[in-house]
């Protein structure tokens, strides 16, 4: 096994310039000093962050949403999720909001599963993953530009779909696998 000390591989940012301000992404070009003293350009997509929820009902069903994702030009099966309103927004409150907006559900029991970085090669996006239990149904209120279908799938069946590669969304895969581990051991 190689050297586990991080100090010998750390880079230091010596210059940063915002080159794009978008609706959900901001792009920075940075210059980093490498451990060998040379410099290298980096391009970073800055994202406010998000929260995602695995809602599991008393019968063991996971409530999911199907929605069209323009960057990959297809409909995906995903856990309810959404971006934070601000970088410092409480992530659990954001998860509760997104669950209610997208599915109409509220939950009496919440467990933080983990935080994931989605694509650290070019983005700083961090998604907090939660398990929601003790669900109550209500009225959904998706954003006006959000069109989705809510579906329920038994957790064991969803795990099989993930194993077969039928669920490519990384936050959904991570969140469901962690929720299954917590629920089923």
Image (cartoon, grey):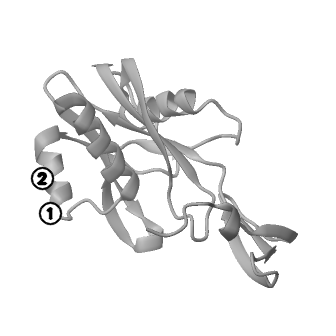
Q: In which quarter of the image is residue 31?
A: bottom right
Label 1 belongs to which residue?
A: 164
Front residue of 87 and 6: 6
Q: Which residue is drawn at 56% across and 27% down?
A: 93
Other residues around mark 1 within 10 Å, as few (<14) / some (14–19) / many (≥20): few
Q: Residue at x 55, y 66 (%)?
A: 3
Where is residue 67? Give x, y as percent.
Answer: 36, 55
Where is residue 173? Give x, y as percent.
Answer: 31, 52
Horizontal side of 134 relative to 129 (left or right) equals left
Where is residue 110? Give x, y as percent.
Answer: 40, 22
Callout 2–callout 1 Cβ contact below 8 Å: yes
Q: Which residue is drawn at 36% across and 34% down?
A: 103
Front residue of 170 and 145: 170
Q: Can residue 63 be seen in this view?
A: yes
Other residues around mark 2 within 10 Å, as few (<14) / some (14–19) / many (≥20): few
Residue 136's tag is none
Label 2 belongs to which residue?
A: 160
Point out the residue furthest to the top here: 108
Horizontal side of 43 relative to 60 (left or right) equals right
Q: Can residue 143 be seen in this view?
A: no
Q: Which residue is drawn at 17% across and 32% down?
A: 184
Q: Distance between the residues labelled 2 and 1?
A: 6 Å
Picture layout, residue 78 above or below residue 164? above
Q: In which quarter of the image is the C terminus?
A: top left
Instruction: Assign a secondary structure to mark 1.
Output: loop
Horizontal side of 113 relative to 37 (left or right) equals left
Instruction: Assign a secondary structure to mark 2.
Output: helix
Q: Quadrant of the N terminus?
A: bottom left
């Amino acid at each position: 096994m190689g050297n586990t000390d991080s100090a010998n591989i750390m880079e230091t940012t010596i210059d940063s310039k915002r080159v794009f301000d978008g609706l959900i992404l901001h792009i920075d070009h940075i210059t980093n000093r490498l451990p060998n003293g040379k410099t290298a350009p980096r391009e970073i997509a800055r994202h406010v962050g998000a929260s995602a929820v695995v809602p599991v009902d008393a019968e063991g069903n996971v409530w999911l949403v199907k929605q069209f994702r323009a960057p990959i030009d297809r409909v995906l099966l995903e856990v309810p999720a959404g971006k934070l309103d601000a970088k410092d927004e409480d992530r659990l409150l954001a998860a509760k909001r997104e669950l209610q907006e997208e599915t109409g559900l509220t939950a009496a029991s919440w467990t933080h599963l983990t935080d994931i970085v989605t694509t650290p090669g070019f983005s700083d996006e961090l998604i907090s993953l939660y398990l929601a239990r003790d669900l109550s149904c209500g009225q959904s209120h998706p954003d006006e530009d959000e069109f989705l279908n809510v579906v329920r799938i038994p957790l064991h069946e969803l795990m099989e779909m993930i194993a077969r590669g039928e669920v490519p969304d990384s936050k959904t895969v991570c969140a469901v696998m962690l929720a299954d581990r917590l629920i089923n051991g």
